[in-house]
Amino acid sequence: MNEIFTARGSVLIAGATIDGSAVDIAIDEKGLIAGIGKDARKTIDADIVIDGTDRLAVPGLVNTHTHAAMSLLRGYADDMILQDWLSQKIWPLEAHLTGDDVYAGTRLACLEMIKSGTVAFNDMYFFMDRAADAVDEMGMRATLAYGFIDLSIPEKREAEIKATETLVSGIKARGNPRIQAAVGPHSIYTVSPEGLSWCAEYAREQGIGIHTHLSETEKEVVDCVAQFGKRPAALLDEHGCLTPRTVAAHCCWLDEAECRLLGERGVSASHNPASNMKLAVNRAMPYHWLRSSGANVSLGTDGCSSNNNLDMLEEMKFAALLQKFAWNSPTLLPAGEAVTMATAAGARALGTGPGTLTVGAPADIALLDARAVCTTPLYHADSNLVYACNGSAVMTVLCGGRVLMHEREVPGEEEIVREAAAAARSLVGRAEDA
Amino acid sequence: MNEIFTARGSVLIAGATIDGSAVDIAIDEKGLIAGIGKDARKTIDADIVIDGTDRLAVPGLVNTHTHAAMSLLRGYADDMILQDWLSQKIWPLEAHLTGDDVYAGTRLACLEMIKSGTVAFNDMYFFMDRAADAVDEMGMRATLAYGFIDLSIPEKREAEIKATETLVSGIKARGNPRIQAAVGPHSIYTVSPEGLSWCAEYAREQGIGIHTHLSETEKEVVDCVAQFGKRPAALLDEHGCLTPRTVAAHCCWLDEAECRLLGERGVSASHNPASNMKLAVNRAMPYHWLRSSGANVSLGTDGCSSNNNLDMLEEMKFAALLQKFAWNSPTLLPAGEAVTMATAAGARALGTGPGTLTVGAPADIALLDARAVCTTPLYHADSNLVYACNGSAVMTVLCGGRVLMHEREVPGEEEIVREAAAAARSLVGRAEDA
């Protein structure tokens, strides 16, 4: 293995391009950016030197809503009505899912994210202790939540509470600063009011975040109003689930008052444009209202069964184009704002740092090929990133100063792909035999 | 240079995957597919052998609407209102465009298309003789039209007629079977009725196609009805411009009767979803009406100034997702139909063959990495192609049996990128000095 992946110590990225200028990025032994500028190389005696020539340096991308292990279900079923798709295809397969599958699927997802410039992600699924094993190995950052679904059944609620507590204590016991737990009340239509209240209180006690789905479909809103006499965001708020450490995915059907509420509570929204389009939810997140409310609008891919990839560069393009199309404004969500959603806003949502290339920030960095077709010409780097490039332009990725990919090589790639393919074959085989 | 790019003769692609089986593809010296199957290698004594192991073979993609040389304007201006964008940014830059720029920009575009699996494209721009030089060198197929814009000024119309005649005779004089001319009446709002009639008649006389823009914006429809008392498709039809050799780009604002008219005339529509979303045209092509009318619905990227890339794999995803979202149906435009749009329908639109991998068809073939992350797992190849992969999964491209890319190497890539970057810098410099 190339020693760049195994060496530890300080790192110098020499002469990378930021805002049109060639600068050095010096990274200390703790994995923090120690200096940026023309002479930053003088500030450290680097153990590892990475040539930044013809490389654009950008903050590592942050995916604030996914179900990583669903990479094993990529392309298993598409082009169906949501309820049929879930009940006939996804749930029957998931019923046979094991911890080993989640490990194999999460490793594949981490590989895919690293290869497209993502350094951190917000995950919700099952067997999350095995997802943590994969994240630990792959060197990324992740916030892991067990998907809490009680369906208003008291016995099920007790089991979900226990599963959540087990995951949180297990993650804390790892003591890995890259991996944190969150509480994952799935949604207001799958979790009882009692369950929501428990999740909010437990998250507060443990000092951890909340990860939920909010207003993905119109049905969710209509049913909520019929059952509770209020809209979903108000219901979440009543049970204490809207906090500055809450990430609410989708947010398609929020009205203006709900957007203001999210802004007041300091909630992070996660925009998931490709998933919303593929499942035909019939409304795009009201980005303009959320932005003016002060809510923190970030970006996520959703799981591979409804996207079907984890490429945040592609997702930025979907976000910028969907907002323009759906709200009929070619000036809405310009490229620079899309980059902020995928970097600084994501890092703020997960508490992983400023999400910018600044002194003192964790060295979470992606280096893109500045001589690729998609970066030619290079008038405004944000435009090339959002509208022209996809994840394949990313050449090198560092997370906390550690090199996860260099010149598109990720250690163990072939084995990870092979084992994920085998796990998927076996999973489908078991489901079909059942 | 790898001799695979220079050798001529018969080609064997050994053991590539089609529909889940490993088969040989034998290509004769004329560049036609001579055999496909488990033992096709026995049918020829191949001069060139390409290992198809772990490669998915698919028909080469066909981009039915672009302005290739606008690759030089990639990212020059985005996130603006259409009229401001054109009048303040695009037109002032285009005023300084030279034939050398078009050559450099078209070479960059061809490189980008080859690297993402496209073998043929339908182009409309200026200095198209220089575009033909680029296409000739790069080995692709193209249908080239001069953008005819008379603005109802008789003197301008005479000049456009002359420019069109010069291009068509020049293309014919080349005698290159990969390059054909078309007549390019830009649109009903930039070409007079007399101009439209001349274009239709000249195309008929010359036995060539027509390439036009149709109903991209609501304003076009409203203005047309106000001025002519009929909608744009009816106006084009009145002047003879709707034929089985017509490609009509965009088609966003067609009503149901117009879709039926396009079907009756055997017109090819070109869906351009990314451009339509980015420019916020406020309506998606009514694919369901066009499909049921019998019109040939193909796919195009539009130019790089409004997309901003030429990746047809990405464009298939935008098409499938936009149709679902805009028409509120998760079952609309399933993956298999998106692949047909980008292959067989495109080839039919441009008359370049069946656009399928069948015996007797031109060997226009893309080989994708079947062990990439985006092709893992591989339940249904069409789904992986449309929803998970982008152009970077394409490893090898053949056009008419000639290898244009192998293992992602395209001869001359670095020089093409460098010269396009220099041309773009010089163009912007001249415009700013003016």
Image (cartoon, coloured by chain):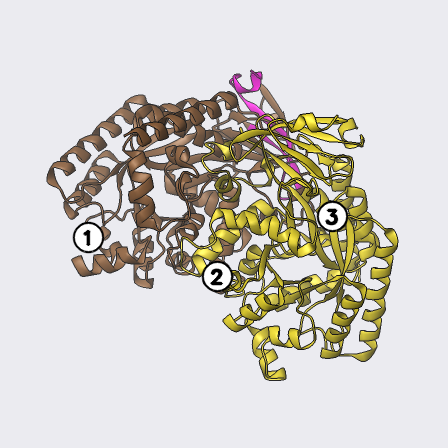
Chain colours: A brown, B yellow
Up/down of B79 relative to B32, above or below: below
Q: CA distance from mark 2 to mark 1?
A: 44 Å
Crowd band around label 1 with a 10 angstrom C-alpha radius: few (<14), some (14–19), many (20+)? few
* Residue for badge 2: B288
Left or right, residue A339 beside residue A346? right
Q: CA distance from mark 1 to mark 3?
A: 62 Å
* Residue for badge 3: B141
The label on residue A238 is 1
Q: Position of residue B72 (x, y in %)?
A: 72, 51
Of A143 and A352, which appears nearest the observer? Answer: A143
The secondary element bearing badge 1 is classed as: helix
Tag 1 and tag 3, C-beta contact below 8 Å: no
- In primary-sequence order, the first of circles 2 and 3 is 3
Q: Are marks 2 and 3 on the same chain?
A: yes
Q: CA distance from mark 2 to mark 3?
A: 29 Å
Crowd band around label 2 with a 10 angstrom C-alpha radius: few (<14), some (14–19), many (20+)? some
Q: Is residue A108 magenta?
A: no
Chain identity of mark 1 = A
The secondary element bearing badge 3 is classed as: strand
Q: Which residue type carries mark 1?
A: Glu
The secondary element bearing badge 2 is classed as: helix
Of A407 and A59, which appears nearest the observer? Answer: A407
Which residues are the magenta region? Answer: A1-26
The residue depicted at 84 percent of the width and 65 percent of the height is B165
Chain identity of mark 2 = B
Q: Which residue type carries mark 2?
A: His
Up/down of A106 relative to B417, above or below: above
Q: Which residue type carries mark 3?
A: Arg
Looking at the rendered image, the quarter that the C terminus of chain A falls into is top left
Residue B390 shows in the view: yes
